[in-house]
């Protein structure tokens, strides 16, 4: 499978997040999966790439051209896909990945998560979405989504469209065995 990993690109991240993401990536690569990611060398993006590199996994970096000169690109990708902008980058990853893992991150990672979640909610994407909830990073976001469901702002089935775990083994299992029936989605009512 081509697994897309979204995550932080920052350099000021606690080592526990980096270690867990790197171990997750090593596990995925050792099981024969390939990585598609935003192409960065730092943060959890870099950790995912290093994990795949350690296990000789195939890596595709999808990078907007304006990052070429910024010195932030992971230099051991097997393949580089250069896009004009961030929107094209996300579209390429959405179209060419078989599953999505959301590791801790900031606004860009939130945007990527909500984009694939919205597409799945609209039955435009039927691929697994797994939140790798290291150190309970996404607990408040999950609580907010559930509160939004209770208040009627988010559809009742939305929390069923993604899975949440802090376990590497369960994350890999969920990516490989997602069985959500996309036909259960109701657009209205």
Image (cartoon, rainbow, N blue to C red):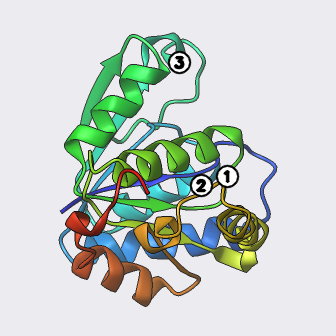
Crowding near the residue tagged with mark 3, few <14, some 14–19, many ≥20 C-alpha atoms within 10 Å: some
Residue 61 marker: none
Separation of marks 3 and 2 at Cα, in angstroms: 17 Å
Separation of marks 1 and 3 at Cα, in angstroms: 19 Å
Residue 67 marker: 3
Separation of marks 1 and 2 at Cα, in angstroms: 8 Å
Q: Position of residue 187 (x, y in %)?
A: 36, 51
Q: Position of residue 67 (x, y in %)?
A: 53, 18
Residue 105 marker: 1
Q: Are marks 3 and 2 in contact (CB under 8 Å)?
A: no
Q: Is residue 78 visible?
A: no
Q: Position of residue 101 (x, y in %)?
A: 44, 62
Q: Quadrant of residue 90?
A: top left
Label 3 or label 2, whichever comes before in sequence order: 2
Numbered disc in front, either 1 or 3: 1
Q: Are marks 1 and 3 in contact (CB under 8 Å)?
A: no
Which residue is tagged 2?
Answer: 44
Looking at the picture, tell me which residue is in the foreground, 105 or 29.
105
Looking at the picture, tell me which residue is in the foreground, 46 or 115.
115
**In the figure, is residue 88 to the left or right of 6?**
left
Question: Compared to 67, does 72 lie above or below?
Answer: below
Q: Are marks 1 and 2 in contact (CB under 8 Å)?
A: yes
**Mark 3 residue element:** helix
**In the figure, is residue 47 to the left or right of 128?**
right
Which image quarter is the C terminus in? bottom left
Taking the spot 32% from the left edge, 66% from the top edge, the residue there is 128
């Amino acid at each position: 499978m081509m697994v897309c990993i979204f995550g932080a690109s920052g350099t000021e991240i606690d080592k526990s997040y980096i270690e867990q993401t790197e171990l997750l990536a090593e596990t995925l690569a050792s099981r024969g999966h390939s990585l598609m990611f935003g192409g960065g060398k730092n943060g959890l993006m870099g950790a995912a790439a290093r994990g795949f590199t350690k296990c000789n996994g195939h890596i595709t970096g999808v990078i907007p051209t304006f990052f070429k000169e910024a010195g932030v690109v992971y230099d051991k990708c097997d393949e580089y896909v250069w896009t004009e902008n961030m929107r094209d980058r996300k579209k390429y990853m959405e179209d060419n990945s078989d599953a999505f893992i959301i590791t801790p991150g900031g606004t860009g990672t939130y945007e990527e998560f909500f984009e694939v979640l919205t597409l799945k909610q609209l039955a435009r994407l039927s691929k697994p979405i797994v939140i790798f909830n290291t150190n309970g990073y996404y607990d408040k976001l999950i609580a907010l989504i559930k509160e939004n469901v209770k208040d009627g702002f988010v559809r009742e089935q939305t929390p069923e469209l993604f899975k949440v775990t802090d376990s590497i083994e369960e994350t890999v299992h969920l990516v490989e065995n997602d069985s959500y029936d996309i036909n259960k989605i109701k657009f209205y009512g």
